[in-house]
Amino acid sequence: MSYTELQVTTNFSFLRGASHPEELVEQASMYGYSRIAITDRNSLAGIVRAHVAAKKKGLTIIPACRLDLLDGPSLLAYPTDRDAYSRLSGLLTTGNLRAEKGKCHLYKKDVYEYARGLLLIALPPGTLNERFEYDPSFVKVLQEYREAFGTQLFLAASRSYQGDDAKKLYRLNQLAKQWSVPLVATNDVHYHHPDRRQLQDIVTCVREKCTIHTAGFHLHPNAERYLKPIAEMQRLFRQYPDAIHQTQAVAEACRFSLDELKYVYPEEITTGGRTPQEELTMLTWQGAQERFGATIPEKMVTAIQHELSFIGEMNYAAYFLTVHDIVRFARQQSILCQGRGSAANSTVCYCLGITSVDPTKFDLLFERFLSSARNEPPDIDVDFEHERREEVMQYIYRKYGRDRAAIVATVTQQHQKGAIRDVGKAMG
Amino acid sequence: MSRFVSVWFRHLITDWFSVRQPSLKSKPFVVTAPSHGRMVITAVNAVAASGGLYPGMVLADARALVPGLTAMDHRPNLSATLLHKIAEWCIRFTPCVAVDEPDGLLLDVTGCAHLWHGEEKYLATIVKRLEERGYSTRAGMADTVGVAWAVARFGKHSVIKSGTDTEAMWHLPPEALRLEPEVVERLYKLGLRQVHDFIGMPRPALRRRFGAALLLRLDQAMGRATETIHPVQPAEPWQERLPCLEPIITATGIAIALERLLDVLCQRLVQSEKGLRLARFKGYRVDGKIEQVEIGTHRPSNNKKHLCKLFEDKLTTIEPDLGIELFVLEAPTVEAHTPGQSALWETSRGLESIRLSELIDRIAGRVGADRIHRYLPDEHHWPERSIKPAGSLQQQPAIPWTLERPRPLQLLARPEPILVTAPIPDYPPMLFRYQGHLHKIAKADGPERIEAEWWLRNGEHRDYYYVEDEDGQRYWLFRLGHYQSDQPVQWFLHGFFV
C-alpha cells in the first residue's frame, strides 16, 4: 500500500512554505516516494523547479495548485491532462487579472467554469465547533461542491497533532460516507524537514508583519507539517486505510506532466506567402545592402549565412520578425529605440536595424547571442524612448491582442539582503 | 522665603562608637587608619580633643600627649552610612532632608517650624532629640543653606531671623563660607579675618585673587545664587504628614491619626480624579524605629470608608512602644479614577461592581494579596505562557480566551512527574500513578503536540493527552519529546479538569 503526498506548499507560495521545491523533491526521493504533488497557493510557479529536480531523481511531479477562494473553502486542483492544465492556468490568469499585483481573486463559480478535467480536493476547516462537529456552513459548501464537481471531488484529511485528530478524522469519514466524497490523506506539507519550523515561523512573521514575540497564534503550535515517511503516514491513518489508497487513485488519474508542454510562437505576418525564414532571409539581405552598400564584404556574407542557417535550424525566424516589426513601427513613429545586450553580437540584428554595432569594425561573437549549447530561446532587449514607450506597447497590443501580450511577469523572490532584514525585523 | 537648617555633628564617628560602647564616652579615644605605614587619626572624641588631639595626627604622637589613649579602627564609608540613616530619621521634622558630607545634614524646613510652635523651639527640639541619640549636635537656621551652615559651625545664635542673613555673616571667620583651605589661608595672610573685611571689596578683585569659588559661596550665603539640596527620600506627591505634639501610644490615637490623614489624602485624590492602588501608613516612633502597614486595592479607590476598613485589620500590628510622634500616609501607586454615579454603584454587576472589588480587597487583607489572582489569556501556545496575571480587576483581555482546545481548569505551575504505562510510540496512556494512587484510564484523547517556543527557550515538544480515569476524574498529561527506545520516557501531570 503506497502513499502519494498530495498537498505540498513550497516557498513559491510566497512567505508560506519554508522549503525549496528541490529540497522537497530530494526528501521525497529519500523516503522512497515515486510521486508527489506540488500545490502552491493560487500559483503554478513552484512546479517548474520541482519538475526539473524530480527528473534528476526519477520522481514524478504532479503539477497542481491550491485554490484559495474568496467565498468558500480552499480546494486543491489537479489537472488530469493537458487541456485541464491549460484551463487551470486560465483560471489563475483570470484571478490574477482581477486583483492587484501579487494577489489572486477567485470565486467558487470560476472554479465551476474551469473545472473540466480537474480533480479537486476540498480542505476542511482546522477546528471543530463546540459540538465536535464541522461547522454546518462547511457541510453545506461541501454538498455544493459535490453537486458541481461530481466524482471529481475528494475530501482532505490530515493529522495535525492538535489534540482532536481522532475526532476530526471520525467526522470527516462520516461526511465522506454521507456525501460520497472519498477521503484522501494529506499531510499539508509546508517544509521538507521538521527543523525548518524556525524558518517557517520567521516567514510567518514577515508575512503577518509582526515580530516573533508578538506573533502569538499566527504561528503553528507544532512542527508536524513536514514531509513524513510513507510508513509513518500509513501508521497515522491506520484506522482509515482507504484515505491512503485514495492518494494513489488521485495520483494515477493525474497523467499530465510538464514534459507535454512546448512553447508555441504566434505566427508572424509575412509578405508574399513566404515562410518566416524566407521573409527573414529576404529582409536581412535587403538590410545588408542598406548597411554595407551594394558590395557586401565577404566576411559579412559568411556571417549572415551562418546566422541565418542557425536561426532556421532552431526555428527562431518568427521571433526576429516580431522584433523587427516592432522596431520598424518605432522608427516610423520616430520613437527612439536601440537594441542592446547580447543581441548586438548578431549581424542579422544589425542588418535588420535592431542593433547598431558595426560588425565590420568589431569582431562579433554570435555564439554569445545564440548557441545550440545554450538551448534557450533568443532574447533581444530593445530600449524605447521612455515617454513614448506606451505607444509601442499599444501597437503590440493592437497587433497581438491584449490578452496575448504581457509585460513580463516576474515571480518575486526574497533576495538575500531583504531576507536578512526581514528576519532581523521578525526577531524584533 | 525658604528656611534651611544645617546640622553639624562635631564628633559623628566617635559619637557612634560611644553609643555602641558607652564606656568609651568618658575616655579619650580616637579612630585611626593606616596611611603610609603609620597610623593616622581620622576622628577624635570630645575628651581627646580637649587633650589637644586632632584628626591628621600620627597615633604615636597622640599617645605621647595622652597616655592610655584608646584607638579604634577606621571604617570606610561609615560617615556616609550614618548620615544617611540619621537623615531618614530626621524626616519626622521635614520631608526634605539631605546629607551634607562629611559631617552634617541639610534640612529644608520651609513651613515646618510652626508645627513646633516657632523656630527656636523647633531647632531646639531637633538638637535635643539628636543629642538624646548620643550625637553632639550644633544646628543653625537661616534663609540660605550657606548661612545656616555657617551659624551651625561658627555662630553664636543658632536661629538667624529671616532677612538678617548678611548681618549674621558679618563677624564670622572666612571658613564659615565653605571655602577650600588654601583660599582661607590666603585670606588670613592678608589679614582678612572676618567676612565683613572683604564682603564689600570689588568683585573683579576678589575673583582675581581668590577665584570664582569665593564669589559663588558669598552669593549663596547672601541668597543671590540658588542652591539646591538633594533629599534622601524624594518627596511623595501623594503623601500626608501628621506630627504629634505628644507621642501617641493608644490604638485609638493611631486610628484617629489614620482617619485624619485619610481624610486629607482622599480629598486630594477626589479633587484630581485619582484613586490609590497602594497605601502605606507609617508611624515614626520616639525611639527612632518606623512602624508601617500597607494595603492594596484591586481598583483605584479614594473611598475613605473603604480604605479605613482595609487598614483596620492591620492597625493592631503597629506597636507604639514609647509613642509615635509622626504619622505619614503615602500612596506610591495612584491611578486615574473617574467617579461613578452614586446610583449606579448600588446596581452595577460583575467585575465593574465596586462592592465586589471592595470585598476582594477585604479578603486579600485576611489571606494576603499574593494569594488572589486574576488571569488573562496571552497569545502563546506553550501552556505556561498562555496565561498572564491581570493588572487589575477592570483590565479587559486583549485577546479572547481560546476555546478550541481543551485546557484544564487548574493548571499546575510546575508539571509533576508521574509514572505511566502507554503503548509506543504516541498512543494514549493506559494507566498512571500519581501521589501513590493508580489511575486506570478509561477514555483518552490526543496527542496535542506543542513545540517549545524556540525564540524564548529551546527544548523538546510535549504530547498532551486529555484522559479520564475509571472514577471519571479528568487529567491533562503529557510526554516530553518523542518516544525513544534507548531512553526512559518522561511523563508529567500538568492539570485537572472539572
Image (cartoon, coloured by chain):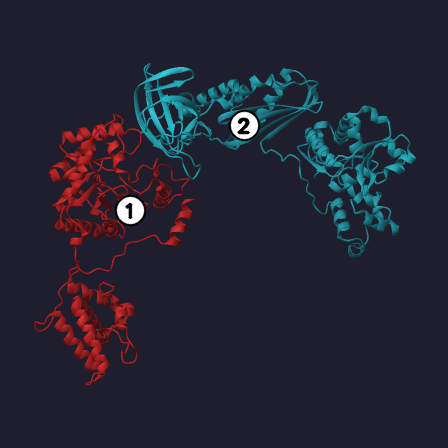
Q: Position of residue B311 (x, y in %)?
A: 56, 20
The amino acid type found where label 2 is placed reads Leu
Chain seen in red:
A
Q: Nearer the viewer, residue A78 or B363?
A: A78
Q: Position of residue B242 (x, y in %)?
A: 65, 26
Q: Nearer the viewer, residue A376 or A271?
A: A376
Q: Position of residue B436 (x, y in %)?
A: 42, 15
Q: Is residue B247 above or below residue A215?
A: above
Q: Is residue B98 above or below residue B251?
A: below
Q: Residue at x 33, y 41 (%)?
A: A193
Q: Residue at x 34, y 32 (%)?
A: B449
The amino acid type found where label 1 is placed reads Glu
Q: Position of residue B403 (x, y in %)?
A: 32, 28
Q: Name the residue carrying label 2.
A: B278
Chain B's shade in the image? cyan
Q: Nearer the viewer, residue B130 or B371?
A: B371
Tag 1 subunit: A
